[in-house]
Structures are given as C-alpha cells and as structure tokens.
Image (cartoon, rainbow, N blue to C red):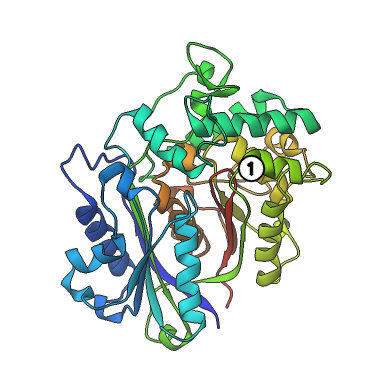
Amino acid sequence: MSVWILGGHQTDFARNWCRDDREFGDLTEAVTAGTLEDAGVDAADIGVIHVGNAFGQLFTRQGQLGGMPATVMPEFWEVPAARHEAACASGGVALLAAMADIESGRYDSALVLGLELERTVSGDDAAGHLGAAAWIGHEGEDARFMWPYMFSALADEYDRRYGLDDAHLHAIAELNFRNARANPNAQTRGWTFTDASFTADDTANPIVEGRVRRTDCSQITDGGAGVVLVGERFLARSKAPKARIQGWGHRTVGLPLAQKLARSAAEPYVLPHVRNTVLDAFARAGIPGVDALDGIETHDCFTMSEYAAIDHFGITGPGESWKAVENGDLEIGGRIPVNPSGGLIGGGHPVGATGVRMVLDAARQVTGRAGAYQIEGARRFGTLNIGGSTTTTVSFVVGNEY
C-alpha cells in the first residue's frame, strides 16, 4: 500500500522558544495547527499520531510527549499516539512507524510530529545532553564535546583510507550556509561570514574538537516539523498537492564508532550499513541509483557527515566525495543539489524534528512548493537521517509520480 504526504509545516528554526517563555505544549500546538492547515485536513481526520523526540527529559525534564497533542488540542483526546527516540534519527523512525500503521491498514491517516527544545541550557550543557546518544562510559571519555570529537574521528578514518583535504569540508559548510539565506525558516539565514570563516583560521573559525571547526558544526536549535501521511483509502478525500513516499531504508548497528570502523576495515565504504540503507530506499523506489534523484536532503550534523553521505549515496565512488565538492555537483543547478534548504548546518538541527523536516522539504520540492530554494523541475528527492555515529540510519525517496 502506498503512503502519500498531504502537507506539512515547519517552525522558524531561528526562534528561541525558551527566551519567549514557551514550552513543549506551545511548540506542539503550533506545529500541529500549521501541519493540519497545510494538509487541508481537520484533527478529526487523523487516525494516529507519532512524535519524534530525542532529548525531551534532558533539556526540559518533559517526557511522555506522545500525550502532548491531546494535552494542548482536545480534538485529539483518545487518538492513539506514541513517542519515538533514535537520537538524531528520531523523526525518521517516527515516520517509519506511521507508514507501517497505514500500510497495515490499521489507520488511514497519521500525523507525524518532530519536536525538540534545546536552547534551554548553556552550549556546554547542551553538548553534554546530546552526547547521551553515544555509548556512555565506553567512548569519547576524553572529549569535551562528544559529537565533534566523533566526527573528527570519522574524518581521520577517511583521511587514513583515502586522504582528506579539510578545505573540502569547509566548502560544504560555505554552501550550506549560503543555501540557508534563501530559506525563510533557516536558523542562520541572517548570519554573516567572511571568507576566513570557511578556512583553517583559528580566530575566524576556531577548532572545536580535533579537526572539526566552528562552521563545520550544525546548530543548537529549537523547533518542530510535521507532516500528514495518508493511505489510498484517504487519498481521494484530499485536493492538496501530494507527494508519495516511493521508497525507504532503515538499518541499525551498534553504538560505538570504533566498532563500526573496525567492522568495515576491509570494505570499500567506511559505513557500509549507511550505503545499504540508501540502496534499500532506491530498490523499494524502483530506481537504479542516485542519478534518478533531482536532489537530496541529507544529515549534515557536521560537514564530515555530509562528506560521507556524498559517496554513500553513490554521487562519487568510495572516498571520492571531494570530486563532487570541487565540480559544483552539489550546488543548486548542479548535477545533484544537496541540502538546498541549508541542511542542519545552515537550516538548524532541532534533533527530533530533523528527519521529519527533511521529508517535508523533499515533499515541497517535488510538488513545486519549496519557494526561493526550489529545484526547478524536481520530481524525485532523497533523504538521509542518521542518529548517533550512524547507529540508526533512515533514508527515504519522495516523488510526485503515483
């Protein structure tokens, strides 16, 4: 059974909800109302709700977020709902659960929400909370910032296997910040940079951990995104522009990065499970490879995660991601635009919302509703959402062909 995206909504990722004296109830209500309006459905039309959230208890002490929609919107009283946690892939996993509900015939429609509030604490404390997605007590014990440390280690592994010029990582950062300027919901759309911001200049672009510098990092972000998914029985009721989830992939491996790298030592890809996730999505979509896509929204929690996504999508051969960076392949108007929204680095990264936001952007692209960052003639988009050091990996292919 096919699953369609009727519409969705994203909050302004530049907004600091804590500073505005707002909490999860306010965020949930805003995302839900915007999503239902865009999809052209009423609350009574929703059969089930799935919420992606990674760190609610740590940043706000609020758990049980499956119950938040009914708390703030009485129309959802008694509508079944659940929260899903898979670190930065929480939104992707929530989408998969909603799809399974629809494909099984249990429900005809689902509201999927991705919600996260992270700007409730200092930057150092936020980094500590986010580090809970690693294998605590077993890796990164010497790191001040867990995830910059981990993705610096991934960069070192690429360097050891293939060679890696950090200038290519800086170029990815510059592109994503530049793309974000056209996105009215991007966290960094009004930020300013100099040429030195994307170099090894220790003043303009200081080191965070290892070889990871400030502009190599995604943002600490508040925000949410939502979509309405429906099956065939519901489809005829709606006149909204529709995108179809044509394919999906989902793989999970162990927590430690070192374990992943050791297992792939003799493989052509550094992260073969990520490659397999993408190939699963391609196979289910019935497409031969990445050249059947018109663009990609990928998980650039750091520039290194996007660098790895480039070859794992098959844009280049293993270890050759630099070629796509140098050739302009990733630019809007290039061979395969990557993160036209600005991604996580430019757009923002409210962790539990990211996977949902990617699919929403993909749906907007293929229905011609992406606004100033629209890829002309886009008919099919791919996404890649990762949790931790790629422990949980979710990929979707979204298209406008039924």
Please tell me which residue lies in front, 335 or 37: 37
Identify the image quadrant of the C terminus.
bottom right
Residue 290: x and y in percent read 71, 56
**Residue 270 located left or right of residue 183:** right
Residue 186: x and y in percent read 39, 42
Establish if 277 lies above or below 399. Answer: above
Residue 21: x and y in percent read 15, 42
Three-letter code, disc 1: Leu
Residue found at the far front of this picture: 137
Q: Quadrant of residue 220?
A: top left
Q: Secondary structure at mark 1?
A: loop
Identify the image quadrant of the N terminus.
bottom right
**Where does label 1 land, which residue?**
330
Residue at 33%, 41% (x, y): give it. Answer: 118
Establish if 226 lies above or below 296. Answer: below
Asked whether the viewer can see residue 383, the reply is: no
Asked whether the viewer can see residue 225, the reply is: yes
Establish if 244 lies above or below 115. Answer: below
Please tell me which residue lies in front, 335 or 91: 91
**Residue 380 located left or right of residue 13:** right
Residue 100: x and y in percent read 50, 76
**Neighbours of disc 1 within 10 Å: few (<14), some (14-19), many (20+):** many
Establish if 79 lies above or below 282. Answer: below
